[in-house]
Image (tube, helix red, strand yellow):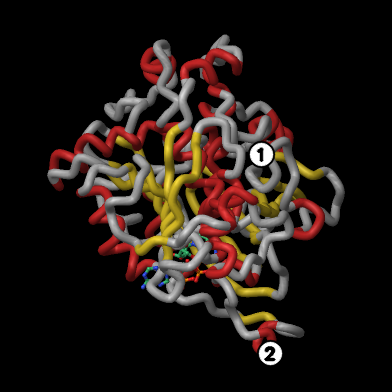
Amino acid sequence: MIVPNRPESDLLQAMNERIDVGVLGATGAVGQRFVSLLDKHPWFRLTAVCASERSAGKPYAEACTWILRDPMPEAVRGMVVQPVEPGIECTIVFSGLPTDQARTAERAFAQAGYGVYSNAGAYRYADDVPLLIPEVNPDHIGLIPIQQRRRGWDGYIVTNANCTTTHLVSALHPLHERFGISRLFVCTMQAISGAGYPGIPSMDILDNIVPYIADEETKVEEKEPHKLLGRFDGERIIPPDFRISAHCNRVATRNGHLEAISVEFDIKPTAEEILETWREYHPLPQQLRLPSAPDKAIIYREAEDRPQPRLDRLAGSVPGMATVTGRLRPDPLFDFKFLTLGHNTIRGAAGGSLLNAELMHSWHPDADSLVAANGAVPCAIPPST
Ligand SMILES: NC(=O)c1ccc[n+]([C@@H]2O[C@H](COP(=O)([O-])OP(=O)(O)OC[C@H]3O[C@@H](n4cnc5c(N)ncnc54)[C@H](OP(=O)(O)O)[C@@H]3O)[C@@H](O)[C@H]2O)c1
């Protein structure tokens, strides 16, 4: 990988005007994260908040039951919530809509020329829609011109992965690149906030673990890691051929999904080689110094009882955006086992979409050669969209 010699000020100078953005589903768990993360964002300015008919027409502060620890940003309190329909004043929208609503609304926005950055599952598996983690598969944005041509859209949709897959694949990506995964087992312990707000009734989750999350295991076993780790040949994504077994559980933590992973490789690494691979991992968002990219994409915790959700979910230079690993040890059935932890509503949802949008808008006079040098296809979307 080539590390660009590009001071942060150059990038910010290239972004001399902030881009107006809207949030669809702005009152929900993910929507609130967007609102919070967009407050004082150096490239994006929040100009529209949209939600259901229940909320439309009310000031945001009245429509929204704010569930984040940081206070609701002042600038959004008086913003009137608008219906989820194109026509709002912005060029890109971040979507935290439920999947059924996202199916119609995101298409309508893309058709109307908006760039749509979605957390919902509606378009994640469409073969012309990027499922993007900027550290893992930035070249998949090459699908966007294909999507626009095929569907006749002026805008486009970019999706991010499910919160569990995001941290699983983030930890595995550099290992897969170097050693090749041949088999994978994962058992997840997923936080309550992953089910939205108000989520699971407290009487069901306190003092309990619910060993079922609808559709989650299929997403992990069959759909998302294979698309994310697939090779883009200029037309389509060609998936790798390893198999995954997943057990997904809902546990009584508020934020942060912990995952126990066992993995077998094509080329057998030592533990030190795995640690070295994580240590030296410096992918494109870190090279580009995108505002939401943490200095270290993967942080390894040395202590034998870490990572833990309460202690480690906000680790790193951009809280909630890094993937934290730990307890790497030999596995008697596979080659190695370890734990991974990541924040589900920051990197696993709103922060992930924000980083996707930053990648798409990072194009700078020298960005094409930079991206091409990294094996990625330069994006056809001009910075103004
Ligand atoms: N929570 C996570 O960790 C996580 C992680 C990754 C992805 N996701 C995905 O992100 C999306 C949002 O999840 P969430 O947890 O934020 O859900 P949520 O808390 O239930 O919020 C849903 C939002 O959508 C709006 N909405 C609901 N029905 C609507 C309709 N018919 N028309 C227009 N707007 C409507 C709601 O507005 P009102 O307040 O007005 O009802 C609210 O703003 C889902 O697709 C989910 O799968 C969630």
Closer to the camera in the image, 238 or 256:
256
Q: Is residue 63 above or below residue 276?
A: below
Task: Decide which of tag 1 and tag 2 comes sooner along the chain.
Answer: 2
Closer to the camera in the image, 352 or 177:
352
The x and y percentages for residue 8 are: 60, 18
Q: Is residue 281 visible?
A: yes
Three-letter amino acid code of the residue under disc 2: Met
Considering the numbered disc 1 on the image, is that residue within a helix, a strand or a loop?
strand
Q: Classify mark 1 as within 8 Å of ligand 1 or not, answering yes or no.
A: no
Three-letter amino acid code of the residue under disc 1: Ile
Closer to the camera in the image, 286 or 291:
291
The x and y percentages for residue 101 are: 33, 68
Residue that carries the numbered disc 2 in the rendered image: 203
* Residue at (20% x, 49% y) in the render: 111
Residue that carries the numbered disc 1 in the rendered image: 298
* Residue at (67% x, 30% y) in the render: 295
Q: Is residue 225 visible?
A: no
